[in-house]
Amino acid sequence: MISLFGRALIERLSNRWLSLVHRWLDKRIPPASQHSLTMNTIFVLPTGFGWAFIIMSLCLFLLGTNYQNNLMVLLSYILLSVMLLTLFYTHQNFARLMVKSKPLAPFHCHQTGFFHLAVVPQDESDYSDSLSQVIRSSNTQSDFPSSKRCKGNIVASWFGHKAQFPFILDAAESNGAENTTQILTIPIPQTRRGLFSLPRLTLACDYPLGLYKCWTHLDFSAETVVYAKPLKGDVNTVSALNDESEQSTHSTSMTNQNGSDFHSLSDYKAGEPLNRVVWKQVAKSGDWVVKAFEEPEQRNHVLSVDTNVETETAISLLTFHVIEQSKQGNLFGIQYQSIDIKPSSGETHTHQCLKALACLHNGGSPFEKKANTFNAVHSRKVNKTKKRSKVNKSASS
Amino acid sequence: MKAFLTRQNAVVNSLDMAITPSTSHKSTSYLMLAVAYGVLLLTLTDELMVWVIVLGMCALVVRVLVYLKSSQLPHPRTINLLAVLSLFALTWFGFSIGLLNSMINLLAVAFALKLILLNSKRDFHLLFCTSLFLIGCGFISALSMIAWLGYIGVLLFLLLALAYYHGPVTPLRSSAKFVATLVLQAIPIAALLFLVMPQLPPLWQMPTSKSQQTGLSDTVTPGDIASLAKSSDLAFTATFPSNDDIPLPQQRYWRALVMEDFDGKTWSISDRRKQAERQLSLLQKTPPLTQLLSADINDVTDYEMIVEPTKQNWLFALELSVPNNEKNNILANAQFDYTLRASTPLMSKKSFYFTYVPNASIDNAAGDFERQLNSLIPTTTNDETRQWALALKRQHATPELLANAIMNYFRQQGFSYTLEPNAMPVDPIDTFLFEEKAGFCAHYASAMTFALRAAGVPARMVTGYQGGEQLDDNVLQVRQYDAHAWVEALINGQWQRYDPTSMVAPSRLNFGLEQALAEFGEKRTSGLLGDISEGALFMTLQNWMRQMDYQWSKWILGFDANKQKDLLEDLLGQITTKKITAVFLASLSVVGVILLVYFFPIKRQPNRPKYQRIYRNALGLVEKHTGVKRHHLSPHQYLKHVDNYLEGSTKASLHAMTVLFNESVYGGDDNLDKPLVTSKMKQHFNSVKQSLRKQNA
């Protein structure tokens, strides 16, 4: 009983501590899509090996003092000076790192999502002075060779997660390819659907001697939508006719069958699905024409699932059908629980639907009727730590 | 979650595949570490047992084979077995080689075994630290400047291995450059620390190495010193205030040990003497040597000796010298036989300060005890000598006459001075005095002491060094071949010095051993080097090396709290707490400045052509005048921005400049007439400047 209470207390304290740390970090390293490391954003401490090195130097000092041997003392001073200088070299190297986040692609929760981070050479990224840029490019021989870049092993990890992803900087350059922007691909540890903002990314480097570890916690203010896992199965397709007053007809059918009759050709309007374009015609005459169908109303679905189906299954089913509908270029909408999306088509619409499904009962969705968007985002920010601890728990279990 | 983890593993594995270029770096740095270890082993031959060195070399060979991919790493079980065996061997030999050496051996063995299995970052770091410690151990016995440079080389190599390991794609060359820069930058900081950090006294007693006591030993069998004469190692260096203070060659007797016990063959320090010394010190009696200075003696000389490590307690000093213990880091304690003992064995080069009292006499400090102790001789051996001594005693009334008679005997009876006398196993003194009549200093001293004792005159043998080579105006260097033995006889309550060797080879005292031997047709050293060493070039080189070594010993090895204090006093005058604080703060800021110089070099302006600089200056003026900042606009864009703010001539000039700039930079004309462009730019710049000034006025 007491231990239970104690554990709860410890958990509360650690949560409190974490939120403090995050508040401090937010102030110190504000979120941005591009980070170039500065004095404020770099943390440096000796590694375990660094401490061993210091202890060894002190041992040599003691030995030298006890034997009254100046050479040993001198050796220990040299080692300590090397330690001191390496501090600066490690920092100097790491401070040359400049990273830029690439746009995040949404992914389904049974897949691994990847966060792409571009390592930009600091001297080339100096766009503030286009003149010097011009001049530098006019000098064909670069005055600043690769020595000005951050080198060594970079270890990336998500704040609060144990998994580490090592990278070698400038690996491409050793193969002779200069001036290439290296992209670090970091897996995103997310297995649940929803809208998540990525935790801070920790980058660490111990170049050149491994005596110190330089690290930083970067917030790229990147949000990712993790779609629900698609599940094959039946859903209710409600044909939403143009006239809304008309009664809906329920038909339980696989909506992926495409049995519509061709009616006529009409001019292409921007936003119409590309798979209806009559490519042969385009190739022949250059006119963009699309097929018009006899029963356009029937292609205008609203997908829904019976309430007796379990929510997660329903979401998975809907996700599957949204993808299918989108592939066929149909006009479709969703009506499920609090989600109510009018039929439409196109990539943005598909994303909206999938996002709405992903966020249902999970961190708030902009399409839920009751949900206040601002609150959802706000509560997400606040709940960040809680979520993280949950993830940790599930990881440890 | 599990699925995620496996996925993640897959990702990590695929990343590992990408890391493969670094594996060659890893194995190369492992090999470099192994090579550094091999070099360290070879420098530690004094401390390490042969089997340990062999084991270490095997480990090195394993590493080389693994590197060449012709062999797999051995199974850990094999190594564990080897470790158990080595542990047994270490404990078995451990007692005979002393605590310090067994620790070093243990370290070397553990290193070798771990080296064979080395396959992880952690182990690599562990071995790196251990090899740093092995370097430190190397300094226990190797103190010369050459050794220091060599070990710094090993350190550089180790750091290179470390840098190569941690720079997975850095080429070896740039790693080497980095490490060299790093150590070069570290040396000034280290030197500063060395100068200002307090030199502490030993914090606790450390185990000392049992092996290799060098120099004189505390027992003398005639013939021993002859073997010492083959060595030209430095014994000590003495620095006098000036050239005039150096004693004459024949007075340079460096007294070390007094041998009062003789068993018929070997002279040794008497056990009864050791006991008596202990008792006297327990009674807190002060030895007479320490009271020497209290008498009014004017003619004294302070001098400093840098003593090479002997790993023994006893010290030597000019006959007679009083230790100046206020300045000595290791105390030099006077004994009742006027010899000196250091408070700890000399494990490294050490400075000692003495005051030389030339005309002092050695008194009988312990009364009848000394008289009795120095009259004992074994009564069963050397009959002939005893008869001869008794006969001499009957002829000569006083001990002085008797001693002179013995000295004359050596001079007149055709004795010769040689490093390689024949062996004299039975009744050595009889054989020497009446048959061989050839020997080294210890033979003469031993024979004379024995004869005096047989004739009833208390006498003892003294060993030490005699002579010394002048290195500088005021510096004497004494080498092992200057080792000498002479006689002290107790006459009228004072111990008088007799040197029978001087009767046979008078040049020994004035010109040294080599000259004395040459007169008897012998050479101290034989072989190739003997001829080379007489060449002028070689002599110069040798002298130069000796000078370097002397400076090294004096300033680096002998640098202690006193020298530090002297140095600070020279710089600052009287030392106060305030000044010491200031010195510390100053050195801290010096370190800061050094770091600043290293890491924040003055930012150099990029080397642009002159016309471009002029253009930029003009833009600067315009910015200042209009208050419109250019930021990162292109020249044309900026021109549009500021167009409205400018007036006639300024505008025209700036337009012209912009056109000129764009033409010359973007024109792609390789044969650009730069001087022309520059002069045009300058003209426009001047007009801009003038027109702006007019407007401001």
Image (cartoon, coloured by chain):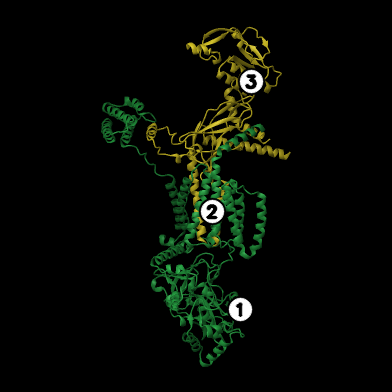
Chain colours: A yellow, B green
Amino acid at the residue labelled 1: Arg
Q: Which chain's residue wears label 3?
A: A
Which badge, 2 or 1, is on the more N-terminal residue?
2
Give whichever of B14, B524 is nearer the camera.
B524
Distance CA(mark 2)–CA(mark 3): 64 Å
Residue B313: x percent and y percent? 55, 70
In the rendered structure, find residue B544 and report the number of the disc placed on it: none
Work out whether disc 2 and disc 1 sit on a shared chain. Answer: yes
Distance CA(mark 2)–CA(mark 1): 51 Å
Q: Quadrant of the C terminus of chain A?
A: top right
Label 1: element kind: helix
Residue A355: x percent and y percent? 60, 22
Q: Which chain's residue wears label 1?
A: B
Residue at label 3? A320
- What crowding class fits label 2: few (fewer than 14 Cα within 10 Å), some (14-19), or many (20 or more)? many
Q: Quadrant of the N terminus of chain A?
A: top right
Residue at label 1? B272
Left or right? Give the position of A372 relative to A35: right
Q: Which chain's residue wears label 2?
A: B
Q: Residue furthest right?
A: A1
Q: Is residue B606 above or below residue B47?
A: above
